[in-house]
């Protein structure tokens, strides 16, 4: 497909591309997050513990999401990014639908892996596409708007999922010839997986832009050169990527367990907990990620060459009290209030980090290094965040009712480490920005 180069007059179309990719990202998080509302039924029907459920929620998805990210990021650097997005949407939608037909732990584990494979195609291609549609001074806001898909999707998963779970909980199991009996949690997977075809058709409307700053040739950069580039600047990339990984370790743990925490600690119905959680995630998560992008762009406009890393360092410091205290509140209203602050300052990072990465990475390496960032971030955050909380509950506190202590402990050890990493990375990050943009 012939690449199309866009001028400054095509900014409206560039925002259309961001909107389409953001909708795809939203849909991916609905498929990813719906599991969190079904802890009880899945544990009961599959006969598993909190640790077993956490493997379904985090590790099964994260393994192939991260492993496939590198080759798919490399593909995005050298082939049609639009087509990669379309195929990814179709594949993860199919696998989400197949989750609804799982009857044993290993079957659900494998289909969740498949969801991870499909979703691994999206973000490396999306970051690269958006970076070629926007100038650097607008990139933080653009990628932050794309990143709102995390919170729109997770929020919708909680709200719509809560309503669906409440509706299906009053519906008897569905008997389908040849397929057998499908329970409420299985039907929920099918309901959220099937619309993927529509999102894939929408993604087909994206036009492939010319690669800004790329050499005239289409030869791929060998992976060893990408690795050499990263290792030669390890003082920038290690704090930058590990910092967000520790934020994600906390964030994904909260995402996976918060509705269940409200249910166990304050005896709320899981559907009601999901709806209130979803509204908070939608409003405060979306507000936080957009505010973070605007804040980083503002710092850059004022001359801070370390604007992106400086912004997330400030965000991490603000997150600490909200994250540690929300599980310890005496009633659900106070827990939800502090959880709003958690969502705002956690989401603050997720538009800034990938946009700042694009600034210090050459064009032909963006897909691969974005995939490397996603690999480390998700294997630590998504892979171990839900599992860490489950392990603490099962083996340290040894009581399902102590889930609140597991969440508080996770916050206490992860977020201060993230803030320290960001702080020590400020000077080398400035040097890397000066190398790329002067």
Image (cartoon, rainbow, N blue to C red):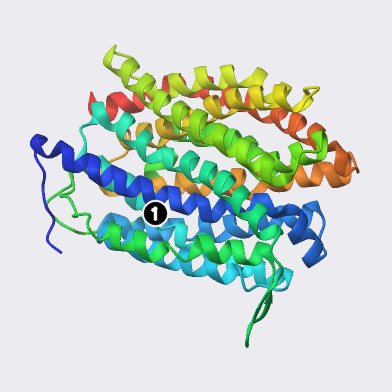
> In the depicted view, which residue is nearer to us: 115 or 377?
115
Going 76% across and 38% down the picture, which residue do you hit? 268
Q: Is residue 419 left or right of residue 194?
A: right
Residue lying at 42% horizontally and 24% vertically, measured from the top left: 292
**In the image shown, does 283 or 72 lie closer to the viewer?**
283
Quarter assignment of residue 199: bottom left
Q: Nearer the viewer, residue 134 or 267?
A: 267
Please tell me how crowded label 1 is: few (under 14), some (14-19), or many (20+) other residues with Cα within 10 Å: many
Q: Quadrant of the C terminus?
A: top left
Instruction: Name the residue at 17% across, 43% down.
Output: 13
Residue 220: x and y in percent read: 26, 58
The secondary element bearing badge 1 is classed as helix
Position of 1 with respect to 284 (left or right) is left
Residue 221 seen by the camera? no
Residue 178 drawn above or below residue 231: below
- Residue 335 vs 159, above or below: the answer is above
Q: Position of residue 335 (x, y in %)?
A: 71, 26
Q: Residue furthest right?
A: 398
Left or right: 6, with 131 as reference point: left
Q: Position of residue 420 (x, y in %)?
A: 59, 22
Which image quadrant for residue 99? Answer: bottom right
Split into 4 quadrants, where in the image is the N terminus? bottom left
Q: Position of residue 169 (x, y in %)?
A: 71, 58
Residue 201 in view, yes or no: yes
Q: Residue at x 81, y 32 (%)?
A: 405
| Residue occupying the far bottom of the picture | 178
Residue that badge 1 annotates: 122
Q: How many marks?
A: 1
């Amino acid at each position: 497909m012939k690449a199309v180069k866009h001028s400054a007059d095509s900014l409206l179309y560039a925002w259309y591309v961001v909107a389409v990719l953001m909708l795809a990202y939203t849909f991916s998080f609905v498929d990813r997050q719906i599991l969190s509302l079904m802890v009880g039924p899945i544990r009961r029907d599959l006969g598993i513990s909190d640790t077993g459920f956490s493997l379904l929620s985090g590790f099964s998805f994260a393994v192939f999401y991260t492993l496939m990210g590198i080759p798919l990021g490399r593909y995005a650097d050298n082939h049609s990014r639009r087509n990669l997005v379309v195929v990814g949407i179709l594949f993860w939608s199919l696998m989400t639908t197949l989750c609804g037909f799982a009857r044993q732990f290993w079957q659900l584990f494998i289909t969740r892996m498949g969801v991870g494979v499909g979703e691994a195609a999206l973000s490396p291609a999306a970051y690269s596409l958006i970076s070629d549609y926007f100038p650097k001074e607008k990139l933080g806001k653009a990628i932050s708007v794309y990143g709102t898909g995390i919170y729109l999707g997770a929020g919708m998963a909680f709200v719509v999922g809560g309503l669906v779970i409440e509706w299906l909980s009053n519906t008897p199991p569905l008997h389908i010839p040849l397929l057998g009996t499908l329970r409420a949690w299985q039907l929920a997977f099918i309901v959220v997986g099937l619309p993927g075809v529509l999102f894939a058709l929408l993604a087909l409307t994206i036009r492939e832009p010319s690669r800004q700053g790329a050499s005239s040739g289409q030869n791929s950069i060998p992976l060893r050169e990408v690795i050499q580039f990263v290792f030669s600047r390890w003082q920038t990339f290690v704090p930058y990527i590990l910092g967000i990984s520790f934020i994600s370790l906390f964030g994904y743990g909260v995402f996976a367990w918060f509705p269940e925490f409200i249910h166990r600690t304050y005896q709320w119905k899981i559907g009601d907990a999901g709806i209130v959680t979803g509204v908070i995630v939608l409003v405060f998560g979306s507000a936080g990620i957009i505010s973070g992008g605007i804040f980083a762009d503002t710092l850059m406009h004022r001359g801070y060459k370390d604007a992106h890393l400086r912004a997330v360092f400030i965000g991490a410091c603000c997150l600490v009290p909200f994250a540690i205290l929300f599980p310890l509140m005496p009633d659900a209203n106070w827990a939800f209030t502090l959880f709003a602050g958690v969502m705002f300052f956690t989401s603050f990072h997720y538009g800034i980090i990938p946009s700042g990465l694009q600034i210090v990475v050459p064009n032909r390496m963006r897909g691969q290094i974005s995939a490397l960032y996603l690999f480390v971030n998700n294997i630590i955050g998504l892979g171990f965040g839900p599992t860490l909380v489950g392990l603490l509950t099962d083996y340290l506190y040894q009581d399902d009712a102590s889930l609140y202590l597991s969440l508080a402990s996770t916050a206490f050890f992860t977020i201060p480490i993230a803030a320290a990493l960001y702080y020590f990375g400020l000077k080398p990050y400035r040097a890397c920005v000066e190398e790329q943009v002067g």
